[in-house]
Image (tube, grey):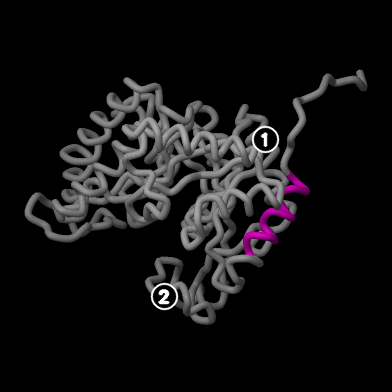
Amino acid sequence: MKLGVMAALFGGKKLDDALAECRKVGLEAIELPAGAYPGDPWRLGGIARDKKALTGLKKKLADHGLEACGIAAHGNPVHPNKRIAAAHRKDLRNAILLAAELGTVVVGFSGCPGGCPTDKTPNFVTCPWPDEFAEAARYQWDKVIIPFWARENDFAAKYGVKIALEAHPGMVVHSPADIVRLRKAAGRSIGANLDPSHFFWQGIDPIEAVRYLGDHKCIFHVHAKDCAIDKRNAAISGNLDIKSYSDVKNRAWVFRTVGYGHDDEFWKLFISMLRLYDYDGVISIEHEDSLMSLHEGFAKAVTYLKGIILTEPVGQAWWF
């Protein structure tokens, strides 16, 4: 395994400075933001069609001893606002083309449409009743999500690219079961960006998620981000909490730097389970800790993960 970072947190830096920072702390890979919600701070969105700029990017990566471990284009390409949807679809296609040039995956969201063709805002369905919600979910899956991602699957497959969808609440695909459902319906270029932080507060066991997604051979990428649940707040409001992420004292849960939501008992098992299911890619740090500065949260994540990731090939069972 290798250690990398989802580099949207460096969006305020120049690309050279971001790459230098990654190398300075001993990372081997970088997940490059290239549009939609992560933004496109280094103007990488259309670079696949610009051979000179593309060559320059590859040289910068090589000069810093880094590989591109993913192109981040998390967006809502099925947004009921056609302007937003069109922009995010363009970003997604550009990300696929760039991923093809860099030999990596695209990381993104499934998106969330409205509950019917005339809706103007996304509708995240969380229960089957009243019946309108079940009808909305059927519309979203059968009329929007599956047809859209079947087309994107075919486009990505043409370029030999895999799309790693992050199961994220607020998006139609928000669980391991959803990822496999979409993969079966839309195609095998669709798989998972496995981020345990989103599973913790949903009550999904990330270890079982590794088993399930591993059995379906669709773990394409992994984010390293933790989550802490405040049992007192959760006991009052539940985990479907819409309070601001900055309202840490009152939220049911918050994102944390790895090791600050769960300890070695989880993280070492998580890393080991990934290896058991043949994931030997990059562990990409994502820092969204409300209690730490950008620098401190990132630095602590690097230090912690360096101590637990498995970097050497599996050895022989020499003891018998």
Closer mark to the observer between disc 1 and disc 2: 1
Residue 36, visible in the rendered structure:
yes
Q: Is residue 62 toward the left or the right of residue 103 in the image?
A: right
Q: Which residue is mark 1?
A: 1
Task: Locate residue 1: give its quadrant.
Answer: top right
Query: Which residue ends up furthest to the left in the rendered image?
Result: 118
- Between 130 and 229, which is closer to the camera in this rendering? 229
Residue 124 disc label: none
Mark 1 touching mark 2, by CB under 8 A? no
Q: Residues within 10 Å of mark 1 (few under 14, many from 20)?
A: some
Task: Locate residue 304: give its quadrant.
Answer: bottom right
Question: Is residue 41 part of the magenta span, yes or no?
Answer: no
Residue 125 x, y percent position in the rendering: 27, 55
Residue 166 x, y percent position in the rendering: 43, 45
Instruction: Tell me where the magenta segment starts and ends, as one range.
Output: 297-308
Residue 131, visible in the rendered structure:
no
Quadrant of the image containing the C terminus: top right
Q: Which one is earlier in the sequence, the residue at label 1 or at label 2?
A: 1
Type of the residue with mark 2: Ser
Residue 286 x, y percent position in the rendering: 55, 54
Above or below: residue 128 compared with residue 220: below
**Is the magenta region chiefly helix, strand or loop?**
helix
Describe the element under mark 1 as helix, strand or loop. Answer: loop
Q: Is residue 253 toward the left or the right of residue 20 in the image?
A: left
Question: Is residue 300 part of the magenta span, yes or no?
Answer: yes
Task: Locate residue 105: give its quadrant.
Answer: top left
- Between 262 and 238, which is closer to the camera in this rendering? 262
Residue 45 x, y percent position in the rendering: 34, 43
Q: Which residue is mark 2?
A: 244
Describe the element under mark 2 as helix, strand or loop. Answer: loop
Q: Residue at x 43, y 75 (%)?
A: 237
Above or below: residue 73 compared with residue 13: above
